[in-house]
Image: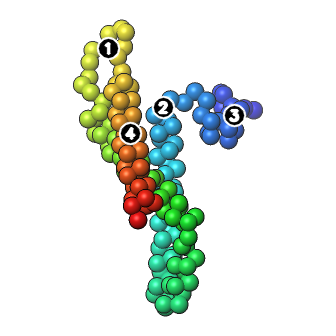
Amino acid sequence: MQTRARPNRLGIRGWVVGGRWGFERYLYTLHRLSGLGLLAYFVMHIFVTSTRAIGPESWDQAMSAVSGPLFAVGEYLVFAAFAFHAVNGIRLGAIELGFAVGRPIEPVYPYETSVGRQRRLARAVLMIAFVVAVWGGLDFFAWK
């Protein structure tokens, strides 16, 4: 006996590719993934900095393990994820509080939605996050 009306035939591909997802759904997924990445970095950061309490030798060993060009790129990716996550979080807060939705209107055909206003805000968020990430990339790699 089948319990769902429409079974999930896409499997993991449906989550990754998205199919007929809208622009906002991709931002939602990217917001979740960046949050999980920041959480993983935070946990790793706590473990690495906790070696300082053990002694200077363990601190030096931990710092030598997390230094190098690969970790510099990883730190930049954490910064870029933070930039996107922070700016997109402000967008989501504005939407939830009703600032980015607009005034209610009479539902007369053809129906108008607030998707146009929210899409402009989402594009602005991506542009701001991109500018902040490029600025941070210059600070990470070019201005040292």
- Judging by the rendered image, the residue that carries numbered circle 1 is 107
- Residue 139 x/y as whole percent: 39, 59
In terms of depth relative to the viewer, which is nearer, 136 or 34? 136
Res 99 quadrant in image: top left
In terms of depth relative to the viewer, which is nearer, 141 or 128? 141
- Residue that extends furthest to the top in the rendered view of this protein: 109
Tell me, for residue 23, which label it has, or none: 2
Q: Residue at x 52, y 50 (%)?
A: 33
Are dots 2 and 4 in contact, CB under 8 Å? Answer: no
- Residue 127 x/y as whole percent: 38, 39
Mark with earlier residue (4, 3): 3
Mark 4 vs mark 1: give the one in front.
4
Up-down: is 102 above or below 70? above
Counting labels gives 4
- Residue that extends furthest to the right in the rendered view of this protein: 1
Are dots 1 and 2 in contact, CB under 8 Å? Answer: no
Mark with earlier residue (2, 4): 2
Q: Residue at x 62, y 39 (%)?
A: 15
Mark with earlier residue (2, 3): 3
Determine crowd level at label 3: few under 14, some 14-19, many 20+ residues with C-alpha closer than 10 A.
Answer: few
**Which three-letter amino acid code belongs to the residue tagged 3?**
Leu
Mark with earlier residue (1, 2): 2
Mark 3 vs mark 1: give the one in front.
3
Q: CA distance from mark 4 to mark 1?
A: 32 Å
**Which three-letter amino acid code belongs to the residue tagged 2?**
Phe
Badge 2 element: helix
- Residue 55 x/y as whole percent: 49, 91
- Judging by the rendered image, the residue that carries numbered circle 4 is 127
- Judging by the rendered image, the residue that carries numbered circle 3 is 10
The reply to whether residue 3 is visible in this rendering is: no
